Image (spheres, grey):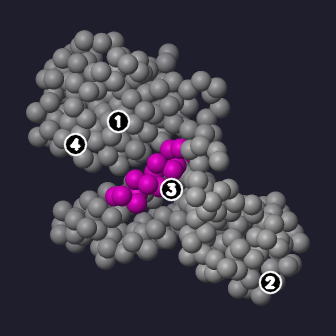
């Protein structure tokens, strides 16, 4: 089984398509439109392409086509149909300049926020799956997941979303972002990709913005090495020594945490020559101490891929 690839069990295909597991197994044996991998326990494991194909077939049969007619077209022709339909759907929703209207994007964002308010796992998952099926990964990351999470954060502060709802959409959003990062990494053309370290400030738990930055870096051909949230600076220092990354990207949303650790970070930055980028709502862009130590202080970067690209490219010139 290929490493670092997303697989789904037959129950997921059945749930997403509305076709029973028994019928899926029967079609699999008779028509050979998909050939699943096998897990360590012998269970069937299906690719994302298989998932899209099964959902496409389910929709076609609901519209009156027979499975035999569809199977006669062959797997490649059916996958091409999916791609053509997605492109047609996107063309209908963009203006002459190739931009999605605010209303179109809101049709993806608003249901996610509403589902978070009602703590509706299925609605969040279905909304994210719909976005991935209908939009490019860049649009999903920058124009759906990130703005949805900003609105969720605002709603949480206003008491419209509970901690449970906020945690639920954050965990699902993180899962989908990690998949997008992995796909971007696999699509990179560089034979050898340069590692960049990415982590949150000590005690900082908010990491979705950092994951969006990691997606941009992966699209730039880097190998984002994710060290997670709440990383002690001593651990970061050891990781820098061991990995020797091209650059380090840190995120902090809390001004309190920023003030607590800024002197320690300045000492760390001053002791090595590897560029350290610090971004997030908690950053003071005019902090002389950190600027003089060599840190690059940024406004929140997650929704500004061009800024991330520009900063990264400065490090490789």
Q: Which residues are magenta?
A: 170-183
Q: Is residue 237 magenta?
A: no
Q: Any mark on residue 16, and which?
A: none
Separation of disc 1 and disc 2 at Cα?
49 Å
Residue denoted by label 4: 204
Q: Sequence-wise, which precedes: disc 3 or disc 4? A: 3
Between label 3 and label 4, give the one nearer the viewer. 4
Percent position of residue 16, x then y: 57, 73
Between label 1 and label 3, give the one nearer the viewer. 1
Separation of disc 1 and disc 3 at Cα?
24 Å
Percent position of residue 268, x then y: 23, 18
Q: Sequence-wise, which precedes: disc 1 or disc 3? A: 3
Q: Seen in the image, is 67 located left or right of residue 234?
A: right
Residue denoted by label 1: 227
Mark 4 nearby-residue class (10 Å; few <14, some 14–19, many ≥20): some
Percent position of residue 84, x then y: 75, 63
Mark 2 nearby-residue class (10 Å; few <14, some 14–19, many ≥20): few
Judge by depth and name the residue closer to the eye, 228 or 314. Answer: 228
Q: Secondary structure at mark 2?
A: loop
Give the residue furthest to the bottom: 64
Separation of disc 2 and disc 3 at Cα?
31 Å
Q: Is residue 182 above or below residue 222?
A: below
Separation of disc 4 and disc 2 at Cα?
53 Å
Q: Any mark on residue 140, and which?
A: 3
Judge by depth and name the residue closer to the eye, 31 or 43. Answer: 43
Which residue is drawn at the image coordinates 43% and 74% (left, top)? 123
Between label 1 and label 4, give the one nearer the viewer. 1
Q: Is residue 182 magenta?
A: yes
Q: Sequence-wise, which precedes: disc 4 or disc 2? A: 2
Residue denoted by label 2: 65
Q: Sequence-wise, which precedes: disc 1 or disc 4? A: 4
């Amino acid at each position: 089984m290929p490493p670092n690839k997303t697989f789904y069990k037959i129950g997921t295909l059945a749930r997403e398509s509305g076709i029973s597991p028994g019928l899926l197994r029967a079609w699999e044996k008779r028509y050979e439109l998909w050939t699943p991998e096998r897990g360590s326990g012998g269970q069937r494991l299906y690719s994302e392409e298989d998932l899209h194909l099964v959902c496409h077939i389910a929709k076609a049969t609901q519209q009156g086509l027979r499975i035999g007619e569809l199977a006669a077209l062959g797997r490649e022709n059916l996958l091409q149909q999916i791609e053509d339909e997605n492109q047609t759907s996107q063309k209908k929703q963009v203006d002459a300049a190739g931009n999605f209207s605010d209303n179109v994007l809101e049709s993806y964002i608003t249901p996610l926020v509403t589902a978070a308010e009602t703590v509706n796992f299925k609605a969040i998952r279905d909304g994210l799956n719909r976005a991935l099926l209908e939009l490019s990964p860049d649009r999903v990351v920058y124009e759906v997941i990130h703005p949805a999470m900003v609105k969720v954060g605002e709603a949480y502060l206003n008491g419209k979303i509970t901690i449970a709802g906020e945690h639920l959409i954050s965990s699902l959003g993180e899962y989908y972002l990690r998949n997008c990062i992995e796909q971007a990494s696999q699509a990179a053309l560089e034979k050898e990709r340069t590692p960049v370290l990415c982590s949150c400030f000590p005690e900082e738990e908010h990491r979705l913005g950092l994951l969006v930055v990691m997606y941009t870096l992966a699209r730039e051909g880097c190998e984002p090495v994710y060290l997670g949230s709440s990383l002690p600076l001593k651990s970061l220092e050891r990781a820098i020594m061991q990995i020797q990354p091209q650059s380090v990207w840190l995120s902090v949303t809390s001004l309190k945490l920023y003030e607590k650790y800024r002197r320690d970070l300045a000492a760390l930055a001053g002791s090595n020559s590897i560029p350290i980028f610090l971004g997030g709502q908690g950053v003071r862009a005019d902090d002389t101490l950190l600027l003089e130590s060599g840190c690059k202080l940024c406004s929140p970067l997650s929704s500004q891929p061009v800024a991330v690209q520009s900063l990264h490219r400065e490090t490789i010139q």
